[in-house]
Image: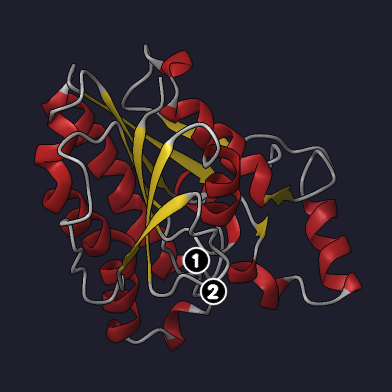
Amino acid sequence: MNKNILIIGGSSGIGKALVNQLQNDNNLFVANRTDEGLDLNKITYIQYDATDGVLDISQLPNQLDGFVYCPGSINLRPFKGLKPETFSKDFEINVLGAVQSLQSVLKNLLESPQASLVFFSTVAVQTGMPFHASVAASKGAIEGLTRSLAAEYAPKLRVNTIAPSLTNTPLASKFLNNEIKLEKANERHPLKYIGSADDIANTARFLLSDESKWMTGQIIHLDGGIGDLKTN
């Protein structure tokens, strides 16, 4: 049976990869700043900007079976150079945007026999990494939110989060924009390559499916081994 799935931020990176994987077998509703890169014959487009958190729910069905929040930020700087405004902006995009959009469709999700919610964190929450203070702080909040919602809404809603390492997406392009940077990033991971958008989308697709129906409240570390393994 086709599911009604809302993806917030689906025109690039992991979100776009997930849309491509799901659009032929599900009823997809994609909320994004623009419809660029989206096949409007296969999805329903909803204009949305994570910075204001306003989501037009008029185009959504009464029942939603899946919710994915993809917007994020990567501010990697020394802590002494991070202004409080940077922390606020990261929190606004990574956390408040997720909270506001989820609250606006919570009623729709509760109409499903069991809806699945998917968020994204970062390996830097579990494994302390220099220059990650701002993004790790906001994504740490997402991990706390995941467990809290999973407990509060079980068994009606399943809530899980994927915590990737650096992934080859437009958001991370400035860290991978030449062969030397790419090679060093690959070498830092025990599996000797960084993840692709499809690698992460594969796991998100699993979490949205009935194959993961006994999984909730989990933080899935999809990071090429960098979070737990030391190989050199």
| Image quarter (top left, top right, bottom left or bottom right) of the N terminus | top left
**Which mark is drawn over residue 132?**
1
Q: Is residue 20 left or right of residue 49?
A: right
Q: Is residue 213 left or right of residue 150?
A: right
Residue 56: quarter of image? bottom left
Q: Is residue 154 left or right of residue 221?
A: left
Q: How is the image coloured?
A: secondary structure
Q: Is residue 117 left or right of residue 187?
A: left
Q: Please, what secondary structure does the residue beneath circle 1 have?
A: loop
- Can you identify the residue that label 2 sits on? 76
Q: How many marks?
A: 2
Q: Name the residue furthest front.
A: 41
Q: Is residue 228 above or below residue 164?
A: above
- Residue 47, percent from left and from top: 31, 70
- Residue 23, percent from left and from top: 52, 42
Q: Is residue 34 above or below residue 165?
A: below
> Which residue lies at the image location 13% right of the left edge and 28% below the top edge?
111
Q: Is residue 144 visible?
A: yes
Residue 172: quarter of image? bottom right
Answer yes or no: do the residues labelled 2 and 1 have beta carbons within 8 Å? yes
- Mark 2 to mark 1: distance in Å? 5 Å
Viewer-side residue, 221 vs 3:
3
Amino acid bearing label 1: His
Q: Is residue 143 above or below residue 54?
A: above
Amino acid bearing label 2: Leu
Q: Please, what secondary structure does the residue beneath circle 2 have?
A: loop
> Which residue lies at the image location 52% right of the left edge and 26% below the top edge?
206
Q: Earlier in the sequence, mark 2 or mark 1?
A: 2
